[in-house]
Image (spheres, rainbow, N blue to C red):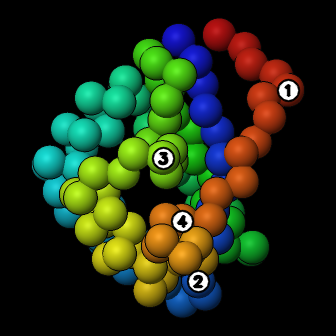
Amino acid sequence: MKRFAFKMILKKGCELEYAKRHAAMWPELKHIIKELGVNDYRILWEMETNLLFAVQKCDKEINSQDTTNVDPITQRWWDMMADIMEVNPDNSPVTVPLEELFHMD
């Protein structure tokens, strides 16, 4: 199992909306993410900087942030989230991969 970690930037004042939208995440989007091999996905919020830190446990080499073959449901989700996050021209969230330096089971 591989872990993939990354950070994203949440726009100031959008914390509650971000949490609300994720609490109501579409079942079909969850299904797509699981089909990619992601079986554990956590997003943490760093309040002072408004950075989001995400960690995914992946059964495959791909993760949910891969923009090479985006399905329409994921694209629709990105489009919906674009007003509250920093995004790329295709509305995918700007993500910065994080290198794992330590892990303890």
For marks 4 and 3 on the same chain, the one whose residue lies earlier in the sequence: 3
What amino acid is at disc 3? Answer: Thr
- Crowding at mark 3 (Cα within 10 Å: few <14, some 14-19, many 20+): few
What residue is rendered at 57% in x and 47% in y? 54
Residue 68, labelled with which disc?
A: 3
Q: Which residue is mark 1?
A: 101
What residue is rendered at 37% in x and 24% in y? 37
In the image, residue 32 sits, relative to residue 75, either above or below, namely above
Measuring from the top left, give residue 88's x and y in whole percent.
Answer: 58, 72
16 with respect to 105 (left or right) = left
What amino acid is at disc 1? Answer: Leu
Q: CA distance from mark 1 to mark 2?
A: 28 Å
For marks 1 and 2 on the same chain, the one whose residue lies earlier in the sequence: 2
Q: Which residue is mark 2?
A: 11
Q: Which residue is mark 4?
A: 93
CB under 8 Å between callouts 1 and 4? no
Q: CA distance from mark 4 to mark 2?
A: 12 Å
Of the two numbered discs 1 and 3 in the rendering, the one whose residue sits closer to the viewer? 3
What residue is rendered at 23% in x and 49% in y? 29
Q: CA distance from mark 1 to mark 3?
A: 27 Å
Q: CA distance from mark 3 to mark 2?
A: 25 Å
What residue is rendered at 65% in x and 10% in y? 105
CB under 8 Å between callouts 1 and 3? no
Q: Would you say residue 42 is visible in this rendering?
A: no
